[in-house]
Amino acid sequence: MNYDLTEEQKSVGEQMRSFCLKEIAPNVPAVDRSSNDKASSIVKDNIRKLARVGYLGCGHEKVYGGAEGNFLQWVVAGEEVAKVCPSTFLAAEVSSRLFGMILTRYGTKEQKENHLPALIDGEFVGSFGLAGLTSARLNTGWQNGQNGWCLNGRMKLVGNAPFAHMHMIVAGTEEQNEPGHDVKTFIVKKNAPGLTVGRPLDKIGFKGFPVADVFFDKCEVSEADVIGMAGRGNEVIECTLNLRSLVTAVSALGTARASMEEAVGYLKNRKGGGLSQAASFKCADMMIMTDVSRLLIYQAAWAMDTHNPEAPVLATSAKIFAADAANQISHMVVELQGEDGYTAGSVSEKLSRDARFYAICGGPSEVQRDFVGTSVLNGFRKRGE
Amino acid sequence: MMEFGFTAEQLMFRDTIYRYAKNEIVHLCEEADWKAEFSHKLWEKLKSMRLLGLPFPEEYGGQAADAVTCTLAGEALAHAGVDQGHLLAMGAHTYLCGDTIVRNGTEEQRKKYIPKIASGEWIGCMGLTEPSAGSDVASLQTLAVKKGDRWLLNGTKTFITNAPVADVAVIYATVDRVKKHKGITAFIVEKNFKGFSTGNPFHKMGVRASTTSEIFLEDCEVPEENLLGEVGKGFLMALQTVEWDRSALLGPYVGGLLFAMEEAARYANERVQFGRAIRSFQAIRHKIADMKIIAEASKLAVYRVAALKDQGRPLNQLQASIAKAFLGDWGMKAASEAVQVFGGYGYMHEYPVERMLRDQKLAQIGGGTSEIQRLVISRLMFS
């Protein structure tokens, strides 16, 4: 048992920290206060900057321009990005970790050659659509069309959709009678006939992370754009869900830490009066929750790296806890700052708006609690049940 | 490099203890808890498994186990369903008393006491807390005065785990109250020493099978050779035990959370209301999920302290306090939810989650309250 990061992991974290402070932090207020289009164009710019320092390549093979590295290493770097600009973080992750990692793990050689270099380069951005947690509830259906597959339906809340060059869409079958073939993952180019991206949603936080519904009307996708071997659709889904949980958890950790640091900085610089016990204990609670979130996240990343069968439960647990922690901590900092915190435009106001997303995105925490609870319950049935 | 798994050897050790506890120990716990009696029969079982001197060097009858393994032993016992009372007795005996002598004692002291403590033949306790000196250790009042070749100790210790059954105690006293923590000095005191007596066992809410009482020192005569370590170094020795307080002594509470979660899960699978198992109610599933998350997080926080100790690195105060506060406060929530899953039955003594909830409360109080942990954490944040 060992809780130490390697020297390399530590140094990656430190490099990302100073990079983000210098390159990303200055435009964060603009991301939060601009129109959807303007905000997401800044974020797109940020993604290119992250590409230049190799961040997007983490976990991807060298031949495609990747930097290799495991989830743990990425998590350490990711916390720094998420802390500074969660919009940039989520947009970059949807593209390089969800779209990209599914491609790296399950794509064909041809698919990887076609898409990965541009993705890791930051030149192209990928979206990811998966509405609903289980395959049975997917909204978009596929049919065995003449030239491959034909997509119909509506994918709700697709991250990155408004500015994506390519969409990765997980679709359930319209005919549920083919066991093992009921879920498939497709790559669809942005201009594909039959594909329409809806208006970007206005949100209370995450202003630079563009989200829209994607509509499919007889959108044809060739067999070459289907991800994953026949019958492994559910494996792709499991990997997707783990990644989604981990990404959201890391983002929440970033917000939790940013909120804690905002609180401590505010209290240290405040003029007059000592530190009340209530205030200092609140800060201690922030520290406890932030630290425990990070432990759960590290463990989840480790479990995913080592193909631990508990990885889905651990990644989901990390997300649930970190999401709650970010919510609570960001609320606490508003309260600690009193009217300064409640003033529109304050740092803590933005943090608490952003934090509201975590219990919702990456799978609603309620659905995820169901999954964790059910997994535990299934382990303690009476024999023979 | 980060590695959250146990070694194959540690896992085997855990499984052996877990199985043994299920088969041989657990059935003794309910009655002991109900009667608030320390079970010597149960102690014999721990003796036979050689669990009472785990961390001591082999030459003194120990097993030279690392801190992770020590923590795991407590976890496995509680996970199997052993009550926290006996596990606290074991913790106070091994870590607070025995290990303090191992670390600070002379060769003679070690030879004289450790084999007896390691085998469990003698039961050990540690006397630090006083009626007016709890978390504020430096203000302790028990006075030690040198008289010829012996020390005379005068004062009262309270809330001393194992005191009523102990054969030997590590007692902290001050040689000069004005010197505060710099005056604190430790002694090895045997129960037969003149002037040593214990009060009636306290009636406690939880951890009832561990006996707790006052220790009265009335001109208690302690020979010079029973001075433990140097004069004035007692405070540091007491601080050293914090490493164990935040690892091996918390292991049983991690196990307790796993035990409660599993009991609740089994019950939720079987209990039928409105024609269906209560697991089919989302609110029940969510409680089980929260117990799982809290158990995982507690495990991570506690074993981090143990792993650091095994690397020979100094205690990280922040991490230690986080482990204690999290396990105390969040563990209390999980324990309460376990009882809630059982509904009316959970409130009944016959169901072990009832005991578990009472036991769990101590994790917020003993060895430094949750509030003291927050004090430590916030001081570190603002220093």
Image (cartoon, coloured by chain):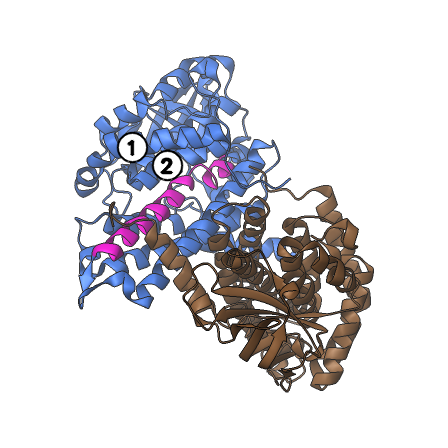
Magenta region: which residues? B241-270
**Residue B254 among magenta residues:** yes
Which quarter of the figure has residue A287? bottom right
Can you tell which mark lies on residue B126? none
- In the rendering, at what x and y percent does residue A90 appear? 65, 68
Q: Colour of chain A?
A: brown
Which quarter of the figure has residue A339? bottom right
**Identity, as a three-letter code, of the amino acid under mark 1:** Ala
Check disc 1 and report the residue beneath it.
B21
Query: Is A152 rendered above or below residue A379?
Result: below
**Quadrant assignment for the C terminus of chain B:** bottom right
The subunit letter for the residue under badge 1 reads B
- In the rendering, at what x and y percent does residue A174 appear? 46, 73
Check disc 2 and report the residue beneath it.
B76
User: Residue at the spot x=56%, y=54% of the render?
Assistant: A297
Whether the residues at callouts 1 and 2 have beta carbons within 8 Å, the answer is yes
Q: Colour of chain B?
A: blue
Residue A271 in view here = no
Number of marks in the rendered image: 2
Q: CA gap, disc 1 to disc 2?
A: 8 Å
Left or right side of B63 for B348: left
